[in-house]
Image (spheres, rainbow, N blue to C red):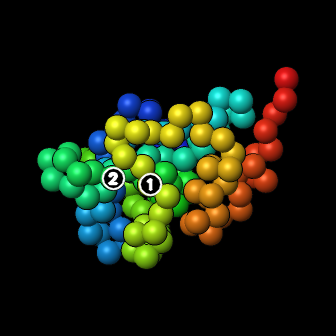
Amino acid sequence: MAPKLLSSSTIDGMKVINKSHEDVGKLKDLMIDWKNGNVAYAVMSFGGFLGIGDKYFAIPLDAFSFEYDDGKDYAVLNVSKEQLENAPGFDKDNWPQNADYTFIDSVHTHYGYDSYSDRYPPKTY
């Protein structure tokens, strides 16, 4: 089976469900570490009503699996409710600007993954 590729524009607004097929939120963006060419984390919106009061969460892409059903792509978030409730988040109007590796590492370790900078050491030019 050939790998399925998703364009970054496909991610925006993609439905996110948990392992029990309950609606969790929507993917908003992918944050790309341009120095290493990796996705540092995905941004998921959660909560609120009609976009008001949404909180955004930084989540490692490894925490998601992607599925296709009934003609639609969706993401399955493979983390516990407790991990999500205590996750590093930010306001939709106040994104981390030029997030350093300390922030990115905290995102990855929060979900039980090795730190990002250990997995992908920063390249120097």
**Image quadrant where residue 112 sits:** bottom right
* Mark 1, other Cα within 10 Å: few <14 / some 14–19 / many ≥20: many
Residue 115 position, x and y percent, is 71, 57
Where disc 1 sits, the SS reads strand
> Quick one: label 2 or label 1, which is nearer the N terminus?
2
Give the farthest residue toward the right. Answer: 125
- Which residue occupies 67% across, 54% down? 105
The residue drawn where x is 59% and y is 33% is: 98
Q: Are marks 2 and 1 in contact (CB under 8 Å)?
A: yes
- Across and down, in percent, residue 49 comes to 15, 53
Left or right for 76, reference 98 = left
* Apparent side of residue 25 relative to residue 116 in the rendered image (left or right): left
Q: Which residue is mark 2?
A: 55
Give whichever of 76, 115 is nearer the camera. Answer: 115
Q: Residue 114 location, x and y as percent?
A: 71, 62
Can you say whether 66 is above or below 34 in the image? Answer: below
- Estimate the spatial distance between the alpha carbons at disc 2 and disc 1, rounded to whole Å: 7 Å
Q: Which residue is mark 1?
A: 89
- Residue at 60% x, 44% y: name it: 40
Residue 29 x/y as whole percent: 42, 39
Of all residues shown, which one is farthest toward the top?
A: 125
Which quadrant holds residue 22?
Answer: bottom left
Which of these two is toward me, 91 or 84?
A: 91
- Quadrant where the image shows the C terminus: top right
59 versus 40 height, above or below: below
Looking at the image, which residue is at 20% across and 45% down?
51
Can residue 73 be seen in the rendering of this structure?
no
**Direction from residue 47 to residue 62 in the image, left or right:** right
Tell me if residue 91 can be seen.
yes
Where 22 sits versus 124, above or below? below
Residue type highlighted by circle 2: Lys
